[in-house]
Image: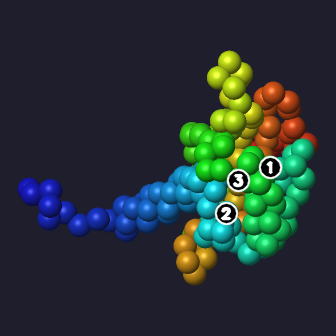
Amino acid sequence: MEQDNIAFSHEEMARLRRLLDEDDIRNLATRYAHYMDHGYIDRMPEIFTDDIVCEYGPYGVWEGIDTVVSNYYQVKDDLGGKSFAAMHTGGTHWIAFSDRNNARGRRQLVDLLLTREAEENPILWLAIYDERYRRTETGWKICHTRLQFFWPERHLSADFPGDFP
C-alpha cells in the first residue's frame, strides 16, 4: 500500500488544523520578541488585539493597544532608543485551546539587558508569560498577557500557577 494515497481521517485533519494554529501562535510570540528587540514598536498592533490587557507586575497594568504602544515607546526611549538594547529570549511554549478561536499559553522569558557592562550580569528578569490568544480576521493575536516574575524579584499573581491548562 502506498503511503501517499492514504487520506487523512477527520480526526487527523482536526489535529493538523490544531498544529497549524499552534505554529501561528508560536510565530506570534517569536515576532513579539523580535519586534521588541528591534524596536519595531509601531508593529505591535500586529501582535496584540485592540482591547489587549497587559499585566506587568511592577510595571503596572496597560489596557488597550494605544496605551501599550505608547508605553513600549517609553521603554524604548528609556533604553536609549537603540535596537537590541535588550533581548527577549525564551521557550517551552505550552498552548492549550479552549475552543477553535481561543487559546491559553505559557512561555518562559529570559530578559537580557545589553546596555550593562561586560562584567555585570545581563539578566534583567526571569519570568513566565501567562497569555490568552484570540483568532481575529487577521490571524491569531494576544488579547491578555500577564508576566509572572521569578528573579531577581518575585512578582506573582495571587492565583499563579492556577489550573493551567
Q: Which mark is residue 81?
A: 3
Q: Distance between the Cα atoms at labels 2 and 1?
A: 14 Å
Residue tagged by mark 2? 41
Amino acid residing under circle 1 = Asp
Q: Quadrant of residue 143?
A: bottom right
Q: Residue 120: percent from the left, percent from the top? A: 71, 22
Q: In the image shown, does 116 or 23 lie closer to the viewer?
A: 116
Q: Secondary structure at mark 3?
A: loop
Neighbours of disc 2 within 10 Å: few (<14), some (14-19), many (20+): some
| Whether residue 143 is situated above or below residue 79 in the rendered picture | below
Q: Tell me residue 36's x, y (percent).
A: 64, 54
Assess whether mark 3 and mark 1 are in contact (beta carbons under 8 angstroms).
no
Which of the labelled discs sits on residue 78, or is there none? 1
Q: From where the camera sits, is residue 97 visible?
A: no
On the rendered structure, is 157 left or right of 108?
right
Q: Is residue 61 left or right of residue 114?
A: right
Q: Residue 42 occupies which quadrant of the picture? A: bottom right
Label placed on residue 65 = none
Nearer the observer: mark 2 or 3; the answer is 3
Total marks in image: 3
Numbered disc 2: secondary structure: helix
Q: Are marks 2 and 3 in contact (CB under 8 Å)?
A: no
Tell me the quarter of the picture where residue 19 sits: bottom left
Q: Amino acid at mark 2?
A: Ile
Vertical order, 131 against 155 (above or below): below
Secondary structure at badge 1 equals helix
Q: Residue at x 70, y 53 (%)?
A: 81
For marks 2 and 1, give the one nearer the viewer.
1
Which percent across, then down, holds residue 162? 80, 44
At label 1, counting other C-alpha atoms closer than 10 Å, the crowd grade (few under 14, some 14-19, many 20 or more) is few
